[in-house]
Amino acid sequence: MTDPMASLDAAYAAVKRAEDQAAELINAARLEFGREIRRMRERGTQQTEIADHFGWKREHVRRLQEAADIADGLKPPRTTNAGAHLRPASS
């Protein structure tokens, strides 16, 4: 006998694969955007000018460039305890 939920499970698995692929594409595009920010900054464009162009805060631009710099090995990964207050305490 065939599992009546098998087709539903297969369709759900297809959605999850598509979501994973989309996340990978978005991440790659963000990294490339951060690289372009780096190139603009190397030509003398200020972070605030880029931020103003998109209606963002300077910090958003800094983080995009930083992510690209880390991915490209130009900057070490951050080793802070950021988000520690969100993790459950160890027993």
Image (cartoon, grey):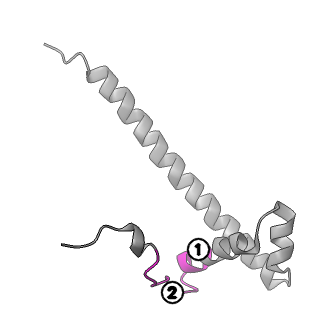
Q: Quadrant of residue 6?
A: top left
Disc on res. 75: none
Q: Quadrant of residue 56?
A: bottom right
Residue at 74 percent across and 71 percent down: it is 36
Estimate how packed mark 2 is, as few (under 14), some (14 to 19) or many (20 or more) residues with alpha carbons within 10 Å.
few
Residue 83 placement (x, y as % from top left): 44, 72
> Within the magenta stretch, is there residue 67?
no
The image shows residue 76, relative to residue 48, as above or below, that is below
Q: Along the polypeptide, which appears first: circle 2 or circle 1?
A: 1
Looking at the image, which is closer to me, 91 or 59?
91
Q: CA distance from mark 2 to mark 1?
A: 10 Å
Is there CB contact under 8 Å for labels 2 and 1?
no
Q: Which quadrant: the C terminus?
A: bottom left
| Residue that carries the numbered disc 1 in the rendered image | 67
Residue at 36 percent across and 35 percent down: it is 13
| Residue that carries the numbered disc 2 in the rendered image | 76
Q: Quadrant of residue 75?
A: bottom right
Q: How many marks?
A: 2
Instruction: Look at label 2 and name its amino acid.
Output: Pro
Residue furthest to the left:
1
Magenta-drawn segment: 68-82
Residue at 49 percent across and 47 percent down: it is 21
> Within the magenta stretch, is there residue 81?
yes
Q: Horizontal placement of 24 versus 13: left or right?
A: right
